[in-house]
Amino acid sequence: MAYYLVTLCCVFTTLGSFLFGYDSGVISSTLDQEDFQNRFNHPSDAATGGIVASYNGGAILGSALVSYISDPYGRRPVIFIGGLLGSLGAALQAGAVTVAMLIAGRLIAGLAVGLMSSAIPVYCSEVSPPRIRGFLGSMQQWMIGLGFVVAVCYITIIRLYSFRQWTGYGCSLHTGAITWRLPLAIQAVPAVILCFGVWLLPESPRWLIEKGRAEAGREILARLHSNRDRSNIHMVEAEIAQINDSIAEERRSAVHSWRELLSKARWRHRLLLACGIQAFTQCSGTNIISNYNPGLYRTLGLKGTTPLMLQGIWGALAQFWNTVFMLFIDRVGRRKLLIPSLLGMGATMCIEAALAQANGGFRDPSANPDAVRAAIAMFFVFSIFFTSLGLISWIYPSEIFPTAIRARGSSLATATNWSLNLVFAQCTPIARSTMGFNYFYCFFAFNWVAAAITWAFYPETAGKSLEDVEHIFSSSSRDDFPHPVPDLKNDVVAVANPADSDWSRENLELSCHAKMS
């Protein structure tokens, strides 16, 4: 397999993303367990809200703190601290004897995931070759999906003592503390593995070069971007030259404070794009469906364990679509996947709301079984359309910032994601009770507006080196640059005819202007 080493590094690093997805799948099942309710004296709605919201609150804080560790000390220490905190948070949750202890554990676990959800996309983007950066960057969303599926599946092994597919489904058939303590404890396993294994990974070569350790960065780039049978020394040297030019340009217009990041137009533009695409994710309605799947199915008249079983199927199919779309994300491009994704989600939400409106809000689901089946089908269609946005929302923010401020930019984008996640988590129960399925019309509007914004303002980044992406943005704000952007199209490593070979295409990707058009 080409680029096997860099692929292995990215797959291992995204174990931190697995924790994010796992918690998303396990917490709703945990809160519904009879033993959990009895042990905590049937916690009030406020206490239940605190249990859920504490995780998001910790994640917001963690994502905001990333740059204070990542910029001076590197990308790996952030992931190490995230793994350490994730282990501690899992232990506190699994051993909780009071609601306060459970909330503390979830706050710490959220802090860990906030750190890692910001740092991991940055690391993956900085170690990846341009031609497969989208594929490797989308490992974050793929691992989130895998964590969700495992969480919904795993308890069946414990509860039924046989291999089945859905944990939440298996849990619903039995009672006892193990039904919720063990799934919470399982979070510690990938966290501990990540905590120790991260030191076996190479540091980001771009961070090393930015810190003046050019030889170490060159050596790591040569190892990571080795493509098996082909010598890649010219490609690496071209990439090193681009990185050095980009860093020199960054130092002429250095950002010394958060205020500069927000006040300078050239950085504010990118920040709005990065935060915007994360906002699109939360405003798409995906968390409403994934977090409230069983409740929505019950609203549609399904009873017993069927809603949990359908949630398991929904999660497994979503993971299948993640796998399929990852293979096309670099070939098709970001924009061509994003715009249909947003339009499709908007249409799906509109159909869902219209079906409910035409059938009295499904207050009597037995009156029109075909409409109920159509409404359920729309949830599954939605997951197909969401896939592109889910994958690209983690890739795009880590591509559009220069090395010196990539951690800060990604940090603010991820904080936007977690902040809106918290807002919707608090507002959705109220909105569902007051608006019913009409609430879905809001997401129809959000998605279609987001599609228009994407079409108008988001440039394509697929297939370009991070330095090429930097030149795309710098050329659009050239007045802010005190020096002209270097032109490398006549560089000795550039290849005039990209059709000659795969090797020539890679070198062409690394010339500053060869693929600008």
Image (cartoon, rainbow, N blue to C red):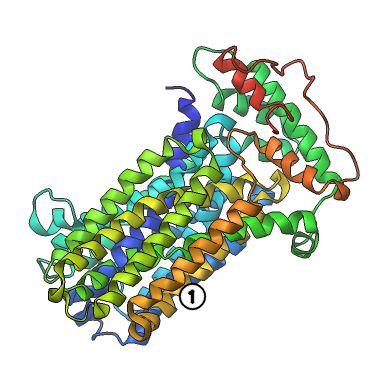
Q: Which residue is at the front of the view, 308 or 359? A: 359
Percent across and percent down for residue 115 are 53, 57
- Binning the other alpha carbons within 10 Å of mark 1 as few (below 14), some (14 to 19) or many (20 upward) gives few
Q: Residue furthest front?
A: 358
Q: Which residue is at the front of the view, 396 or 159? A: 396
Percent across and percent down for residue 414 are 55, 59
Picture layout, residue 188 above or below residue 202: below
Residue to which mark 1 is pinned = 423
Q: Quadrant of the C terminus?
A: top right
What's the residue at 50%, 66% (across, down)? 446
Percent across and percent down for residue 107 are 45, 70
475 displayed left or right of 232: right
Q: Secondary structure at mark 1?
A: helix
Q: Quadrant of residue 178?
A: bottom left
42 displayed left or right of 139: left
Picture layout, residue 213 above or below residue 2: below
What's the residue at 31%, 80% (across, down)? 98
Q: Quadrant of the N terminus?
A: top left
Q: Quadrant of residue 312?
A: bottom left
Task: Name which residue type carries label 1.
Answer: Val
Residue 263 at least partly seen = yes
Percent across and percent down for residue 174 are 10, 67
What's the residue at 26%, 56% (across, down)? 314
Count every numbered label the image shows and give the total: 1
413 displayed left or right of 89: right
Q: Which residue is at the front of the view, 89 or 510? A: 510
Q: Which residue is at the front of the view, 325 or 11? A: 325
Picture layout, residue 75 above or below residue 24: above
Picture layout, residue 1 above or below residue 147: above
Residue 185 at least partly seen = no
